[in-house]
Image (cartoon, grey):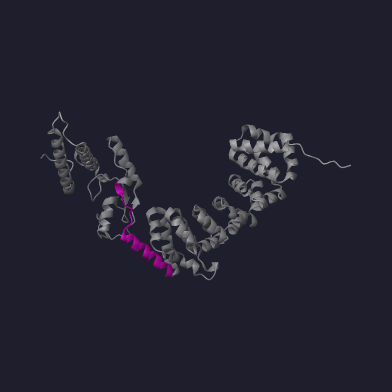
């Protein structure tokens, strides 16, 4: 039998290809030798021959790119993996700064090696960082030679985590019970690792003790003043990084110390600590079960207090967290009871984060107590002014939606709305030019304002 060419470099592929070819020959012979007049062969034979041919084609395609690169083209040496000697599909950097193709360096590390293959230096850790520059250079080179590499994600099929990485995590977590200097060093590294390496975040889910160990410097402190600000910031930010991983959200939020420590961080620490604590609560609140858990824990009050404080770096994260938490009914009541309406209207009147805060006010408007407070706080002229002067369609829509609820709940505000309409035609213009939802709300208000008032006359 002639050589298969594409399988020469891999004995396993040679054996598989030979087996498939023999089976294909047998099936084709059965079909060809059948009596043509009687069509004396089973249809299943054709199906099996077709399946065998596809399997052979798939097997060949696995090596086509490699052969084309290695035998037909002379690619630049710096694009070849030092281990495979082939063009790299997914170049990554190891701790020594050397670049390898991810699956081959993973195979090297999983074989128990703890050194860099090229330099023989001992690796302080086995985390792999994508080499985006080399990858882009390879991509440009392939385009110029009309070569299409397989998708690196399909090509890999591995999570990139090794036993050495697990050992590294254990070592870093152990430092949390050591000196403050060791704690700070380990916390900083964990913050960076969980930010840069998505798969490293998943490691924390493998042990129920990982997060309690991580947060032990915070949970064991006698008071907030005992906590070093940088250490608190790194640990809270690590929790934020962990919460980004979808599979982590439930177990992170349900770890008993997490939400109380995030609430503590909202009240003290650096501005970045407080902002990242709010961001962590926002990310965790993606799950409805977490929304309820966070709300019951009392986290809305420190979020609203931080919103009132108004630090520019924290405002968006705080507003996002409050909005997400208030999607469920019970948290709307909690937010209103904790003073959200007063704080939000005050910020909107001063033109601070109007977009985000109007969205919160709109979802709170389904709460009767919130509507009553809006009336007391003179929200109607403020909302009418936004419709008249703000250029954002979404802001106009949220404003008219809130006014619609007020209109149907509090007749004492009709006079203000009529005066606005008579002077500026604000509501009717939005009914003509607004979004579809804004038009419906505006029409509803106009219908109510134009309804005749039944007066009872007495003698």
Residue at point 53%, 59% (across, down): 293
Q: Going by the picture, which residue comes out furthest to the right? A: 459
Left or right: residue 154 compared with residue 175: left
- Visible in this render: residue 339? no
Q: Magenta region, mostly helix, strand or loop?
A: helix
Is 291 drawn above or below residue 348 in the view shown? below
Left or right: residue 51 compared with residue 209: left
Specify whether residue 66 is painted magenta: no
- What is the span of residues highlighted in magenta in the rendered image? 155-177
Where does residue 235 sit, x and y in percent of width and height? 47, 61
Where does residue 362 sit, x and y in percent of width and height? 61, 46
Q: Nearer the viewer, residue 177 or 248?
A: 248
Residue at point 70%, 34% (across, down): 425
- Visible in this render: residue 160? yes
Q: The C terminus lies in which quarter of the figure?
A: top right
Where does residue 15 sit, x and y in percent of width and height? 15, 47
């Amino acid at each position: 039998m002639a050589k298969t060419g594409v399988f020469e470099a891999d004995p396993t592929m040679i054996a598989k290809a030979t087996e498939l070819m023999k089976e294909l020959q047998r099936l084709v012979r059965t079909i060809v030798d059948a009596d043509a007049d009687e069509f004396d062969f089973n249809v299943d034979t054709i199906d099996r021959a077709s399946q065998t041919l596809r399997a052979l084609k798939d097997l060949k395609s696995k090596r086509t790119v490699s052969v084309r690169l290695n035998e037909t083209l002379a690619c630049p040496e710096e694009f070849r993996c030092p281990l495979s000697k082939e063009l790299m599909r997914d170049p990554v950097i190891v701790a020594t700064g050397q670049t390898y193709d991810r699956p081959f360096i993973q195979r090297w590390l999983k074989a128990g090696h703890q050194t860099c293959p090229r330099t023989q230096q001992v690796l302080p850790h086995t985390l792999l960082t994508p080499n985006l520059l080399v990858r882009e250079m390879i991509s440009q080179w392939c385009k110029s030679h009309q070569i299409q590499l397989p998708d690196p994600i399909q090509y890999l099929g591995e999570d990139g985590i090794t036993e050495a990485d697990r050992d590294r995590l254990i070592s870093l977590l152990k430092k949390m019970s050591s000196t403050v200097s060791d704690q700070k060093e380990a916390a900083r590294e964990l913050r960076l690792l969980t930010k840069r390496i998505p798969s490293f975040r998943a490691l924390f889910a493998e042990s129920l003790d990982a997060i309690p160990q991580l947060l032990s410097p915070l949970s064991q402190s006698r008071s907030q003043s005992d906590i070093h600000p940088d250490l608190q910031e790194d640990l809270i930010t690590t929790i934020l990084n962990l919460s980004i991983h979808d599979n982590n959200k439930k177990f992170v939020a349900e770890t008993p110390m997490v939400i109380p420590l995030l609430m503590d961080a909202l009240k003290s620490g650096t501005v970045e600590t407080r902002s990242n604590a709010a961001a962590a609560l926002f990310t965790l609140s993606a799950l409805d079960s977490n929304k309820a858990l966070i709300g019951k824990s009392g986290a809305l009050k420190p979020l609203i207090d931080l919103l009132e404080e108004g630090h520019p770096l924290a405002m968006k994260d705080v507003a996002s967290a409050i909005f997400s938490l208030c999607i469920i009914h019970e948290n709307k009541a909690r937010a209103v009871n904790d003073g959200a309406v007063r704080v939000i209207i005050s910020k909107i009147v001063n033109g601070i984060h109007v977009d985000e805060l109007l969205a919160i006010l709109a979802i709170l408007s389904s709460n009767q107590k919130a509507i009553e407070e809006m009336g007391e706080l003179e929200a109607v002229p403020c909302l009418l002014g936004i419709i008249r002067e703000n250029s954002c369609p979404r802001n106009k829509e949220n404003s008219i939606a809130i006014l619609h609820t007020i209109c149907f709940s509090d007749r004492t505000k009709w006079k203000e709305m009529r005066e606005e309409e008579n002077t500026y035609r604000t509501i009717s213009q939005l009914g003509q030019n607004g979004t579809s939802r804004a038009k419906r709300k505006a029409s509803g208000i106009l219908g109510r304002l134009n309804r005749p008032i039944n007066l009872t006359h007495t003698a």
